Image (spheres, rainbow, N blue to C red):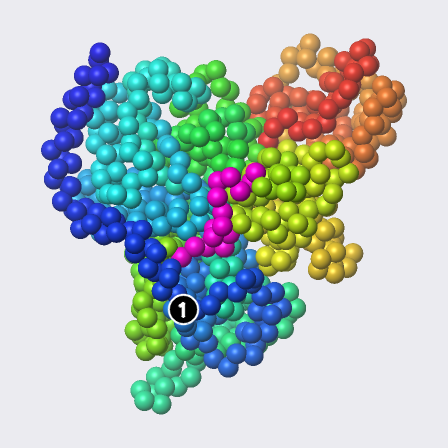
Amino acid sequence: MAFQKAVKGTALIGGGAIATVFGLSQFSQYRNKHGTFVHAQAAEAVTVPIKNDFPTREQQILALKTTSEFDVLVIGGGATGCGCALDAVTRGLKTALLERDDFSSGTSSRSTKLIHGGVRYLQKAIMKLDFEQYKMVKEALEERANLLEIAPHLSAPLPIMLPVYKWWQLPYYWFGIKLYDIVAGSQCLKSSYVLSKSRALELFPMLRKDELVGAIVYYDGQHNDARMNLAIALTAARYGAATANYAEVLRLLKTTDPASGKQRVCGVRCRDVLTGQEFDVKAKCVINATGPFTDSVRKMDDQEVPNICQPSAGVHIVMPGYYSPDNMGLLDPATSDGRVIFFLPWEKMTIAGTTDSPTDVTSHPIPTEEDINFILNEVRNYLSVDVEVRRGDVLAAWSGIRPLVTDPNSKDTQSISRNHVVTISDSGLVTIAGGKWTTYRAMAQDTIDAAIQAHDLKAGSSKTVGLQLQGAEDWSPTLYIRLVQDYGLESEVAQHLASTYGDKAFEVAKIAQVTGKRWPIVGKRLVSEFPYIEAEVVYGVKEYARTAVDMISRRTRLAFLNVQAAEEALPRIVDIMAKELNWSEQKKKEEFEAAKKFLYYEMGYKVKSDQLADSSEISLGPSDIERYKKRFHMFDKDKKGFITILDVQRVLESISVQIAENTLHDILNEVDLNKNGQVELNEFLQLMSAIQKGHVSGSRLAVLMKTAEENLRQRGVISVDRSGGGL
């Protein structure tokens, strides 16, 4: 009864305020009602022919070298840069794009994976009567609808729950969320709604029950960010843009304008990172779309120009899927320091983030232990006491750098909105900075509009609203069934291929290897617990992947889901890529080491050994120490004080169990802190102590040794699969 009264009161309190704001959205709603018609018209208006396939990287490099002059040259292969290339080429402009690393290797692959308008930005717009913030949210909600339409295989609506723990918050949050629906207009994904306490716990059973009043559920979009970025790049390439990853801009080229006598940017000197070869690329207009590196490119143009970017680091962590329901996210609207934390299901795991703190610009941002623990503490505040939130359950962690546009003297990055700005220098360099993932298309449209005007380029209006991206054309929600029926793929693998490649999933299935089993017929997995198959590595090379890091982080998302699984898949990935790209043994070794370094520093693997090292003070009781010593000495028969692969093999053979030597090496290496090829008693006790404290979970060595001890009596089977444990 009290709950019903609160809801009625909420409606009365919020009704008048909503009516006041309603008028702001009328014009936009009128436009939105005609959204489908506009989308169809825009897509049909593209007169540039699209190729059935995209060129090879070698063909793209040749086009960059041999084209006398492009109309538009974009620097930067993130979402915005690729969006600019797609916008320009579909207007009929001769377009090039250069990316010094891989497509989406920076911020665009390290997001919260949401396609959203920004609930917190709307709150600021209302509280501060900031019409610019309101317009940004409105634009983002329109772009959210478009993105869900043009890449349905890579994106989908996601319900997000906002739990309420004080009665007075119910009308406050309900009002804000209803405004979010109203601003979206007819492009609202689904209407938000209020839940009672019992219903909220039914949908999100992990939620903390104490003092829970109820919850509000609203809808935003979610996507596979790196694959979405790649889809934009591949679509631009199919329309004729000369796009190349691993092509670094060394300096800007300039010429003197005979009419004005001023220096004008006319192209770039670049280097093919893979071959070391340097060459010039000429263009009428050069666009700087380099995200956090915006100012470094601007300073190539003018050393004295002041900075316009204030970078902010956002850390995310990934935890096992059991931490959240499969189809419901969670929003913490007010963390202990005023930030917002999302807790979302993603790729059958749980993603939590983000933090927001000033940082230096770097190509290799590293997540900090402080940020990881901040997120874990906030998660603990909202989950039931029955759910033990363990540090050891962090499967991966990463940091992304937001390219916020601000006054260089500002120190509070949380007060900065995500608005974008387009600037044109005296020499004609066009810079697009700021913004957010969701609005990449609108940002690209504004940038190309400005470039056309500033450089007197001959082109019409933007054609990208409603323009379907790579894989979307013949995709349907049931496409995966055809993959199962026609090729004999596992259902989970087929669903993964369909949601990753869309209608191009058939191309991957065609090259999938026969397993030699009754079922599945084709599709050898790279690691047992993830649906990625070996054929994706071959196809990934076609999609311009040129390093092992490209493959584990952006063609597949293994590194973002579980760094131990990614490391386990590395040898096979390197072998397949070596065959496709004709790598030498030395090159294979270099790629393997570079990928391990990436996992160790940028994806949070380093914290695993740090957690063990930090647990050097062994907090075990005397009985526990004695029990674990006895278990250790069962393997260390010679009382050496350490165990090696040979010791483990001997025990396993005695109970008729065989495990591959390379697997055993990996298992011991997870615990071998000083990397001397053996696990010492102290290291083993540190491991067991860390497990008891929750700092480490899912250690295969701990599971193996415990199971071996039991099996010496019972003669059972030992499993060495990961139990879902993390870093």
Q: Residue furthest bottom?
A: 258
Q: Which residues are magenta?
A: 467-481
Q: Residues within 10 Å of mark 1 (few under 14, many from 20)?
A: few
Camera sees residue 284: yes
Residue 558 sits in which quadrant? Answer: top right
- Residue under label 1: 47
Give whichever of 58, 128 is nearer the camera: 58
Q: Main secondary structure of the magenta part?
A: loop
Taking the spot 30% from the left edge, 18% from the top edge, the residue there is 196
Taking the spot 52% from the left edge, 65% from the top edge, the residue there is 51
Q: How far from the left and from the top, in percent, is residue 220? A: 36, 39
State left or right for residue 451 relative to residue 77: left
State left or right for residue 136 relative to residue 239: left
Q: How far from the left and from the top, in percent, is residue 628? A: 72, 16
State left or right for residue 551 relative to residue 714: left
Q: How far from the left and from the top, in percent, is residue 672? A: 72, 33
Taking the spot 60% from the left edge, 59% from the top edge, the residue there is 544
Residue 223 sits in which quadrant? Answer: top left
Secondary element type, mark 1: loop
Q: Is residue 453 magenta?
A: no
Name the quadrant of the N terminus.
Answer: top left
In the rendered image of this protein, does residue 404 appear above or below residue 279? above
In the rendered image of this protein, does residue 472 appear above or below residue 519? below
State left or right for residue 578 relative to residue 260: right
Task: Kindly identify the amino acid type of the residue bearing the numbered disc 1.
Answer: Thr
In the rendered image of this protein, does residue 714 appear above or below residue 268? above
